[in-house]
Image: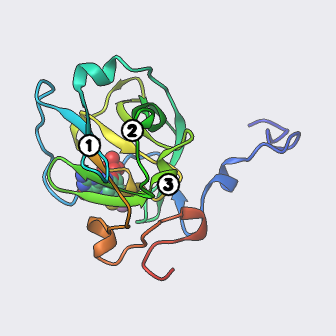
Amino acid sequence: MSIVNPGFFGRRRGPSDRIPPGQYATEEFPVLSAGPTPNIHLDRWAFTITTEAGVEHTWSWDELQALPHETPTVDIHCVTTWSKLDTSWEGVSLDVLLEDVETAADYALVHSYGGYTTNLPLDDLLEGQAWVVFGYEGGPLAPEHGGPARLLVPHLYFWKSAKWVRGIQLLLQDEPGFWETLGYHEYGDPWREQRYAGD
Ligand SMILES: Nc1nc2c(c(=O)[nH]1)N[C@H]1C(S)=C(S)[C@@H](COP(=O)(O)O)O[C@H]1N2
Ligand SMILES: [Mo]
């Protein structure tokens, strides 16, 4: 045990400042899936961004891998009250994927293999806030955690981080996804405890 708490000298945020209200930190990595884990072959895997005009931008697995990779280390917060600090991932930033997409949309509806959906404002996918990730803690992302690839949007509750992601539909009007239709908050900011509709 050290005599001086590492938080003593600086204003660096200590672990307890990183836990949003109503959450607890865990070392575990629980699996939360609303259905079975889909089995997706990499040679048939594709990721498609569809604009409000119906224009499709599609990446094969190899095309995705050829894009610049980032390795974000982030805290994740599940609405069932667990948070996990300093998770490390490898993937491609949505800034890169959206770079050449012409759109006037303000909303995104994320689609997964298996049928799961979740919605969020398009702005929340930009400026280094979201990735399509395929690596976790130095290895490939496990199927139960969304492999081959999932969305990672750590600043929102983890249900927005769609596992087995297959595409993003850009929309002029917001459309609720799976949990949002069932009464969860349309935005889901853990720091404002936006768990359920109306919070
Ligand atoms: N396709 C899909 N993505 C999903 C889910 C799901 O059921 N299906 N569950 C969401 C919820 S509620 C959470 S908390 C996280 C859980 O991710 P994990 O199983 O890797 O912990 O995935 C989110 N993404
Ligand atoms: Mo969740």
Residue 60 horizontal side relative to residue 108, left or right: left
Tell us which disc is closer to us: 2 or 3.
Answer: 2
Q: Judge whether 198 appears above or below 69 on screen.
A: below
Seen at 52% across and 32% down, the residue is 72
Q: Which mark is residue 104?
A: none
- Quarter-of-image position of residue 64: top left
Q: Where is residue 168 in the image (x, y as percent from the top left)?
A: 30, 48
Q: What residue type is labelled 1?
A: Val
Q: Judge whether 33 appears above or below 47 on screen.
A: below
Seen at 69% across and 55% down, the residue is 17
Residue 75 horizontal side relative to residue 33, left or right: right
Circle 1 is placed at which residue position?
A: 55
Q: Do the residues labelled 2 and 1 touch (CB within 8 Å)?
A: yes
Displayed-image quarter of ligand 2: bottom left
Task: Label 2, secondary structure: give it.
Answer: loop
Q: What residue type is labelled 3?
A: Ser
Q: Are marks 1 and 3 in contact (CB under 8 Å)?
A: no
- Number of labels in the image equals 3
Q: Which mark is residue 83?
A: 3
- The disc, 2 or 1, on the residue closer to the chain's N-terminal end is 1
Residue 65 horizontal side relative to residue 105, left or right: left
Circle 2 is placed at which residue position?
A: 101
- The disc, 2 or 3, on the residue closer to the chain's N-terminal end is 3
Seen at 30% across and 68% down, the residue is 179
- Quarter-of-image position of residue 9: top right
Q: Judge whether 129 appears above or below 33 on screen.
A: above
Residue situated in front as seen by the camera: 97 or 165: 97
Distance Cα–Cα, label 1 vs label 3: 37 Å
Task: Please name the colour scheme applied to the rendered image.
Answer: rainbow
Q: What residue type is labelled 2?
A: Val
Q: Where is residue 115 in the image (x, y as percent from the top left)?
A: 16, 55
